[in-house]
Amino acid sequence: MIKVMFVCHGNICRSPTAEVILRDLVEKAGLGDKISVSSSATSEDEIFRGKGNPVYPQAEAELNKHGLTGLGKTARKLRRNDYDEYSLFIGMDSENIREIMRIFGQDNKGKVHKLSEYCSQIGDVDDPWYSRRFDIAYRDISCGCNGLLNELRSNYKL
């Protein structure tokens, strides 16, 4: 099983959007038994008393426009021991990559990547929490997820 973990700062906008998009692509491709998808945060900003906040309403609204939903998803923090449990960690921007590396300490198996590696049309995926451009974030994340799925199919001969 290939296990993909998307990571952003709070796990309420970008990374859950990526989780939902890739999971949908994986299911439509009939690869649900081969690829597992999750998401997490580099911070605890959206986690209170051990409970994570749900997907941000505007991110959920953008998912809904595309026939998708993040209902039931709650924020969770990336943990050091996740490194051994997942195949890939995909950060949304350079800051996420730095924070992932801070949490893990090292990446001796080459598991940590930025989403833009899978879509030449994007750079860092801007945080829509600040930009308010949930449509642009969705577009960029969708491009990256499509490229990532193609890469997984190629590398793992799926």
Image: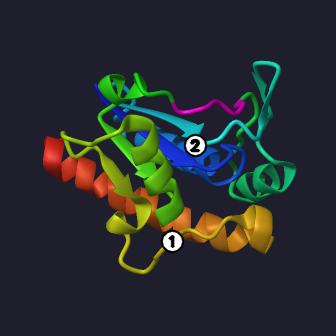
User: What SS does tag 1 mark?
Assistant: loop
User: What SS does tag 2 mark?
Assistant: loop
Please say whether residue 126 is one of the residues in the magenta stretch: no
Left or right of residue 21: residue 104? left
In the figure, residue 47 lies in which quadrant? top right
User: Most prominent secondary structure in the magenta stretch?
Assistant: loop
Mark in the foreground, 2 or 1: 2
- Colour theme: rainbow
Q: Which label sits on residue 95? A: none
- Decide which of tag 2 and tag 1 comes sooner along the chain: 2
- Identify which residue is drawn at 38% across, 36% down: 104
- Identify which residue is drawn at 42% across, 61% down: 115
Considering every residue shown, the one lying at the far top of the view is: 50
Is residue 126 among the parts visible in the rendering?
Answer: yes
Q: Say if 144 sits above or below 1 in the image.
A: below
Give the percent coordinates (x, y) of residue 82.
41, 26
Give the percent coordinates (x, y) of residue 4.
39, 38
Q: Which label sits on residue 124? A: 1
Q: CA distance from mark 2 to mark 1?
A: 16 Å
The foreground one among 153 and 73 is 73
Mark 2 crowdedness (10 Å alpha carbons): few <14, some 14-19, many ≥20? many
The foreground one among 34 and 102 is 102
The three-letter code of the residue at mark 2 reads Thr
- Identify which residue is drawn at 35% across, 39% down: 105
The quadrant of the picture occupied by the C terminus is: top left
The foreground one among 11 and 145 is 11
Is residue 25 among the parts visible in the rendering?
Answer: no
Q: Which label sits on residue 42? A: 2
Magenta stretch: give its range. 73-78
Tally of numbered tags: 2
